[in-house]
Amino acid sequence: MIRLQTYAVFSLLATITSVYYAFSSREQFYPAMVYLSTSKICFVLLLNTGLVAMCVAWQLVKRVFLGTLREAEVERLNEQSWREVVEILFAVTIFRQDFSVSFLAMVAALLLVKALHWLAQKRVEYIETTPSVPMLSHIRIVSFMLFLLVVDCLFLANSLGSLIQKREASVAIFFSFEYMILATSTVSTFVKYVFYVSDMLAEGQWENKAVYTFYLELISDLVHLSLYMLFFIAIFLNYGVPLHLIRELYETFRNFRIRISDYIRYRKVTSNMNERFPDATPDELDASDVTCIICREEMTTAKKLLCGHLFHVHCLRSWLQRQHTCPTCRAPIIPPDNGRAASAQQHGAQPGVQPGAGTGTPSSGGAPTENVNMRQAKLEAAASAASLYGRSFAYPPVNTLNRCSF
């Protein structure tokens, strides 16, 4: 921030000097303005001052709504910035016929607004994982998200107005699409924050929070995928293949496909949870740890998995949205189709190895005498086969062998 202040002071002094020279050397207003717009040095100084003013405004907004950034927020800001700069450069190559000073200003404003959205999402994630958050932090993050939504709507209205006024394909398509994405992301983040506040007011007893969050992310990915496809088609029909959108389109489609598959598996498992997972008996609750490993709270009623571990039914529902393995032992939660394989996994037997084979230990489904008789029968059959094999060859007497030897 100190470096930015120093650079801003020198930029302002250089701009003031150029403006003073223009008006002092040319006494009238119009000739002075023509000189400022035609002189390359004055033009670069004015453009630099405008960019510095935007950066200073960005720093002020960040300081007012977020305060000091955390290390994770700074790291994400650095990672996302380089990627967005590369994508913007690809976009500039597509809209090179619309290249102008206003286009550069809009691109710089878009990058700064995107950076604010990244910080807002990261700050909401931090608030959701922090046990106690001051009321001032809640007020600041709500005001910040409302401010971002207003900014997105203003820029979106400006881009759509320019597009409707010209009634032809222009760079306004790019900015309209970008601010649509940002607006929907802001709404999604705000709704997720509302879910968190509702769960906090309910003292963590809102069982359907994870379900609503899952549907919210699914709808958000669907909206983003639709917008990306529409924008891809619009750019392809008017300008050619938009290379900077291929990666974003692929990642959005992959995330949406993963959420769809997770949703199908989730509905398949939770549709008959009472049949798949029996209720734990009081003796099983007393024999095991009564603390649910997912929510770290005591269990009075619980569901029992195939592996034998116990969990709250609502905790198990929320866990199944992301994972399909036991939180404790990582065994598959969904029972296999083969009932024998499920029974073997439940009792800790290895597939392909018969329990109690070769020993006198009784198996779960047979008597000890059956295993012993089966083993004796195999040994007798092997002995008889060996004797038959030995009698099938005629060995000459030893004396005959001695006479035949030279």
Image (cartoon, rainbow, N blue to C red):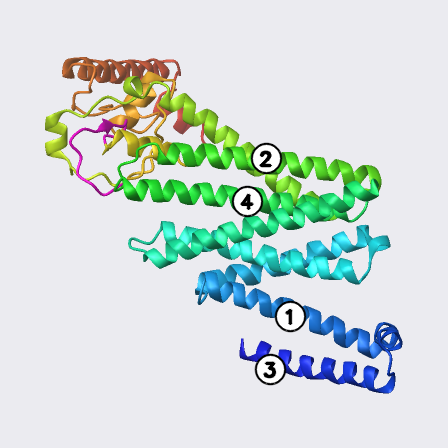
Whether residue 301 sits left or right of residue 145 in the image: it is: left
Q: Which residue is mark 4?
A: 185
Q: What is the magenta range? A: 295-308
Question: Viewer-nearest of labels 1 and 2?
Answer: 1
Image height of 135 relative to 4, above or below? above
Q: CA distance from mark 4 to mark 2?
A: 10 Å
Q: Which residue is mark 3?
A: 6
- Image quadrant assignment for residue 157: top right
The amino acid type found where label 1 is placed reads Ala
The amino acid type found where label 3 is placed reads Thr
Q: CA distance from mark 1 to mark 2?
A: 34 Å
Pick whichever of labels 4 and 2 is earlier in the sequence: 4
Q: Are the residues flagged by discs 1 and 4 in contact, CB closer than 8 Å?
A: no
Q: CA distance from mark 3 to mark 1?
A: 13 Å
Question: Viewer-nearest of labels 2 and 3?
Answer: 3
Give the residue at x 33% y 34%: 331
Q: The N terminus is located in which quarter?
A: bottom right
Q: Which residue is mark 2?
A: 223
The amino acid type found where label 2 is placed reads Val
SS type, badge 2: helix
